[in-house]
Amino acid sequence: MGRMGSTTSVRAREMRLVLVDWQRGGLTLREFGEQRGIPVSTLKWWRRVFRDAGAAELHGTAVENAVEFTEVRPPASVGRTPAVLEIVVPSGHLVRVPAGADSATLRQVLEALRTTC
């Protein structure tokens, strides 16, 4: 059976951001949908699309959407500071930026996310 929906389309990226907003709030999916004017059936459908895509990746059936992680170690001179800014990029990735972050490094991270997603 084929995949029920693409997770790489513009609409999918928009809906991923919508679902990220829902997950951050304290509302039920129904309440969130009513506030946003989005049918709960639409939200449930997209939630299932992303859940199924993630399960398929775990089982090796959706290699084109595979995620690759790279560890980024901060220099020893950088102390731990709480994030003061959160950026959600169109791919749905969340980047937490601490106070005093190096803007050149942040640019590189955002560019890497833009070109790989």
Image: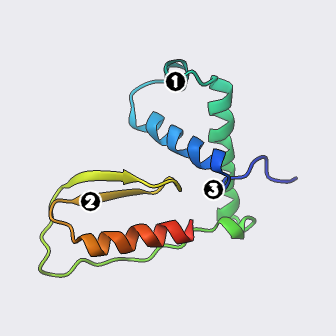
Name which of mark 2 and mark 1 comes first in the sequence. Answer: 1
Q: Is residue 88 above or below residue 43?
A: below
Residue 77 got which mark? none
Q: Nearer the viewer, residue 90 or 67?
A: 90
Q: Report the amino acid beneath label 3.
A: Gly
Q: Is residue 112 above or below residue 11?
A: below
Residue 67 located left or right of residue 113 = right
Please tell me whether mark 1 sits on a helix, a strand or a loop: helix
Q: Report the amino acid beneath label 2.
A: Val
Name which of mark 3 and mark 1 comes first in the sequence. Answer: 1
Q: How is the image coloured?
A: rainbow
Q: Position of residue 97 (x, y in %)?
A: 26, 59
Residue hosting label 2: 97
State the residue at coordinates (59%, 41%): 15
- Closer mark to the observer between disc 3 and disc 1: 1
Q: Position of residue 114 (x, y in %)?
A: 50, 66
Q: Nearer the viewer, residue 66 or 91?
A: 91
Residue 36 got which mark? 1
Q: Report the amino acid beneath label 1.
A: Arg
Please tell me whether mark 2 sits on a helix, a strand or a loop: strand
Q: Position of residue 85 (x, y in %)?
A: 26, 52
Quadrant including the C terminus: bottom right
State the residue at coordinates (20%, 81%): 75
Mark 3 and mark 1 in contact? Answer it, CB < 8 Å.
no
Residue hosting label 3: 54
